[in-house]
Image (spheres, rainbow, N blue to C red):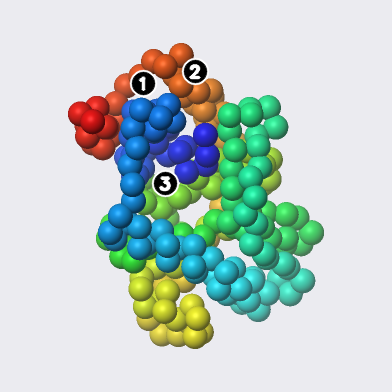
Amino acid sequence: IGASAIPSILRCNGSYEGVVSLWAKTLGRFSETFQGEHLKTMEMGHILEEPAIGEFRRMLKYEMGHIFASADLFQWTVSHPTKSHFKVTPDGVCEVNGKQGLVEIKYTEFDRDGSWSALKHQGEIRPDSKVERHWLQVQAQLCATGLDYAYLVGIVGARTALHMTHGLGPGSEFVVHKVDRDERVVSLIEKEVDVFWEHVTSQTMPEPSHYRDDSTLRA
């Protein structure tokens, strides 16, 4: 189970897929290939990770005032200390004031639900939004690594993606939001990961939770 699976396991309405779809894929009973716009967005996200970590590092030092801070890509897998079935792969790692944290980078071509704008301008995590889904993924990474904070970094819009390689300017939407570890959510993740894993090992289907579960069940 990876961190990106946690929104589905917690039955977040903003999750990409339902818990039945996740369960069926984990057991190898159902597969889904990414194509079209979704595949293009995923590929762009990977391409933009390196310039995004560079821009984040610059902001950390010169806009946030953490001159001696560091930030680098971090793309290996970390297992939860007591749950071998729970592993996470953060995009980056940073160190601010001598304390280590994580970085999760997201690219979206369109801010359809306005949740990235709400995060940037009001610092608001809208319930059941795409941003809440990312926030839960970050909480899962903090849960597995034992760290206390992370930065959620958003590259919002194709124009911002283009600017990433030429320097950000007017019209760019580069969102940086600090996420503190939420012990209530971390405890819930640890509990629900084990509940989901029991469904996997016993091969008993969980209750459907999402409209995408319908197509999985038909398949």
| Amino acid on which the number 3 mark rests in the picture | Arg
Left or right placement of residue 20 versus residue 105 in this view: left
The residue that disc 1 covers is: 206
Left or right placement of residue 7 versus residue 150 in this view: left
- Work out whether 70 lies above or below 34: below
Disc nearest the viewer among 3 and 2: 2
Image coordinates for residue 152, horizontal then vertical, percent: 52, 58
Labels 2 and 1: the sequence-earlier one = 2
The residue that disc 3 covers is: 133
Residue drawn where x is 41% and y is 53% of the image: 131
Labels 3 and 2: the sequence-earlier one = 3
Disc nearest the viewer among 1 and 3: 1
Residue drawn where x is 34% and y is 66% of the image: 109
**Badge 1, how many Cα within 10 Å: few under 14, some, many 20+?**
some
What is the secondary structure assignment of the residue under circle 1? loop
| Amino acid on which the number 2 mark rests in the picture | Thr
Calculate the distance from the C-alpha at mark 3 to the C-alpha at mark 2: 25 Å
The residue that disc 2 covers is: 201
Left or right placement of residue 197 versus residue 206 in this view: right
Labels 1 and 3: the sequence-earlier one = 3
Pointer 1 with pointer 3, Cβ within 8 A:
no
Image coordinates for residue 130, horizontal then vertical, percent: 36, 51
Observer able to see residue 181: no
Image coordinates for residue 84, horizontal then vertical, percent: 64, 29
